[in-house]
Amino acid sequence: MESAVRLRAAVTLLGRFPALAGVDLDISPGEIVLLKGPNGAGKTTLLRLCAGLCSLASGQGWVLGHDLNEERRMVRRRVALLGHRTGLYDDLTVAENVSFWAQAAGASRQDVDEAMERLSLTGRLADTRVGRLSAGQRRRASIASLVVRRPELWLLDEPHAGLDQQSRDTVDTLVRGAAAAGATVVLATHELERIAVLEPRVVSVVGGMVRTADESADPQNQNNPSDAEDDRRVS
């Protein structure tokens, strides 16, 4: 079976700094994978590389069969990244934002309605401009915009950030459902006890390199916080 993600000696630079310094990694279709590591370890950069948003300075990489050295645009059509930025337009309503991403992915109006209902974005909230939303509401709108695209690879950076308990449970349900349907989920978070219920494979990222890739998610042995690398540093 072809890997969903395959990296060999992958190096990615932020300026002149090697944020990824020779990563070897294989992720199979349908897996849920947790990236574990301290602040600045390279987890966010690894997610962005898999999203086709970072280039390889050296090494090789394939995402969903696409060569990261030659086909990054093709990768972007099949994956979705939930990052620190919302990916939303402040002057559009919630419904307009979700519909925009749905149209880009060829999703239906029914898909839009279902995604917004799952994230409790119906009623007056649907017609509210994103610029007027709370942080938690923005996060839910971002997740709905991801869900409606039905990506083959979900890349989630702190997916529970800013959410209430009900919304966090919804995210977990969505992740399980995506993996059960054959999508691959790669996430980075410091909320290890919560993520443990998803039973992910744990990949440790230290100093821009993958140290281990076969651990189970045991919160008693995983107390490193997630990094919060600034997306703006990546050109």
Image (cartoon, rainbow, N blue to C red):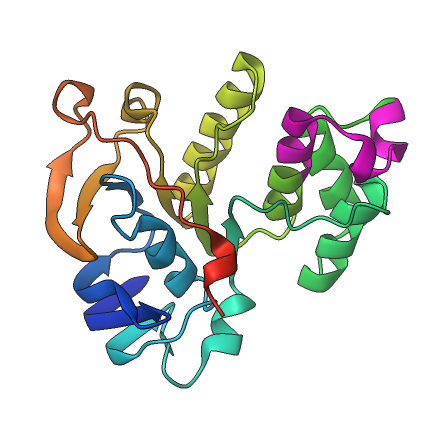
Q: In this orientation, which residue lies closer to the viewer: 195 or 205?
A: 205
> In the image, 126: left or right of 217?
right
Image x and y of residue 162, in percent = 55, 25
Q: Magenta region: which residues?
A: 124-141
Q: In this orientation, which residue lies closer to the viewer: 29 or 81?
A: 81
Q: Can see residue 95?
A: yes
Q: Quadrant of residue 220?
A: top left
Q: Is residue 60 above or below residue 28?
A: below
Q: Is residue 125 magenta?
A: yes
Residue at 54 percent of width and 24 percent of height: 170
Image x and y of residue 214, in percent = 11, 44
> In the image, 200: left or right of 141?
left
Image x and y of residue 137, in percent = 69, 27
Q: In this orientation, which residue lies closer to the viewer: 133 or 179?
A: 133
Query: Considering the image in quadrants, where does the N terminus appear?
Result: bottom left
Image x and y of residue 174, in percent = 50, 33
Q: How many marks?
A: 0
Q: Is residue 115 magenta?
A: no
